[in-house]
Image: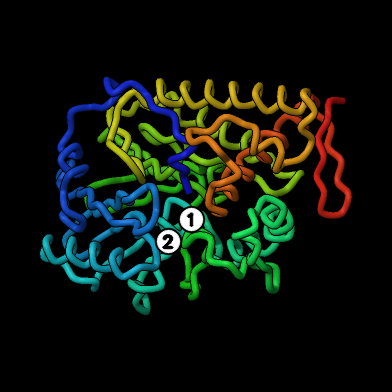
Amino acid sequence: MDRANTGTATPSSMAVPDPADACLAAPFGMPVELLPNLYLVRVPLPHNPLRALKSYLILSKDRTTIVDVGFNHPACEEALGQALAALGRTWDGVEIVLTHSHPDHTGNLDRIYRDGMPVFANLHSFQEVENLQDMEARVFGPLLLKAATPHQSGLGFGKGKPTLHVSAELLPLKNQPAVTFLHEGDVLRAGSYAFEVLETPGHDPWHLCLYEPSRRILLAGDHVLERITPSIASWFPAYNALEEFLASLGKVSNLDVERVLPGHGAVFGDLRGRALHLISHHEERLQEIYDLVAEGHGDVVSISSHAKWRYDNWRSWPLDQKFFSMGETMAHLVYLVCEGKLKQTICGDEYRFELP
């Protein structure tokens, strides 16, 4: 769930000339061949600032592997159906690979899943995702109520879940298909490709990347994007999501990769350069958050509202954008607490931060 409002532009020279460039302007659902039997397909993300997901279709003689599937939205289902038809395929013989649990990558399963369709992910079950959302709601619910402006005050919570529709990205799957667990070191074979599975938590606890060393490609999901800084959020004081993300960047930064195939934006090269840029971005953000606490901003809403974002006037933002920004703020605060640079106090629903 990467936020356009927190993105960081990078030099356009980093993009590698590639057939994927044509896909940036291609109609939704039109497959663009990147490598033999490996296609990139734009899937629309309606009412979302990201605009599109990049799905990847890999063909073998009797099987079609689809990496990431989009929202639970008819336009997403239609785009993938059109891509299959254009390639002379049907839903029979389709298997799904998910880079992570976020609904812009998984939600369409509620529409496209057929009995017996294989689904591969770094998940044992989607119940894990629902359990996490239930627990997180107990933390972010009171914070959202505090951040809401008067016209947003209708937000409520039932059974620990938001009852106001703030974003399709907060909605879990309605159904829970069986999942085949992928973990570090597994090899996923699709057609003539043999992808090494890399666990890369941070943007999502269950995030993975797929590395094909002989083709020098990395299917990166949302771990490393060309122009957008992936959202790193934490709603638990004991969960250091940013530390995991930075470690995951280190894991992939030295891979021999010619092309990174991301979940959003353009295909690009210079994986190491982009990883170093993201590390620098978070170092700057950590210093900014530390300085705000030193100035006396002691709670998540105050810190988030005074931080620098791509767009000004935080108080007027839609509630879902506030949600993502506060999750990012909390992740950086937790990192600083774990480093011993800040002290955290929890009293009921209040989370307070100060210098040690």
Which circle marks residue 308 in the picture?
Answer: none
The residue indicated by pointer 2 is 106
Residue 13 placement: quadrant:
top left
Structural distance between the alpha carbons of marks 2 and 1: 6 Å
Q: Nearer the viewer, residue 5 or 346?
A: 5
Residue 214 visible, this angle: no
Residue 238 visible, this angle: yes
Residue that extends furthest to the bottom in the rendered view of this protein: 115
Percent of width and height locating residue 220: 39, 41
Residue that extends furthest to the front in the rendered view of this protein: 150
Describe residue 206's horizontal placement relative to residue 216 as left or right.
right
Describe residue 247's horizontal placement relative to residue 260 as left or right.
right
The colour style of the image is rainbow
In the rendered image, the vertical position of residue 321 relative to residue 335, given as above or below: below
Percent of width and height locating residue 41: 23, 52
Kind of residue indicated by mark 2: Thr
Which circle marks residue 102 in the picture?
Answer: 1
Q: Residues within 10 Å of mark 2 (few under 14, many from 20)?
A: many
Q: Residues within 10 Å of mark 1 (few under 14, many from 20)?
A: many
For the image shown, how many numbered marks are present on the structure? Answer: 2
Q: Secondary structure at mark 1?
A: loop
Say which quadrant the C terminus sits in: top right
Q: Secondary structure at mark 2?
A: helix
| Residue in the picture at 30% in, 63% down | 76
Kind of residue indicated by mark 1: His
In the rendered image, the vertical position of residue 239 relative to residue 217, given as above or below: below
| Residue in the picture at 37% in, 76% down | 116
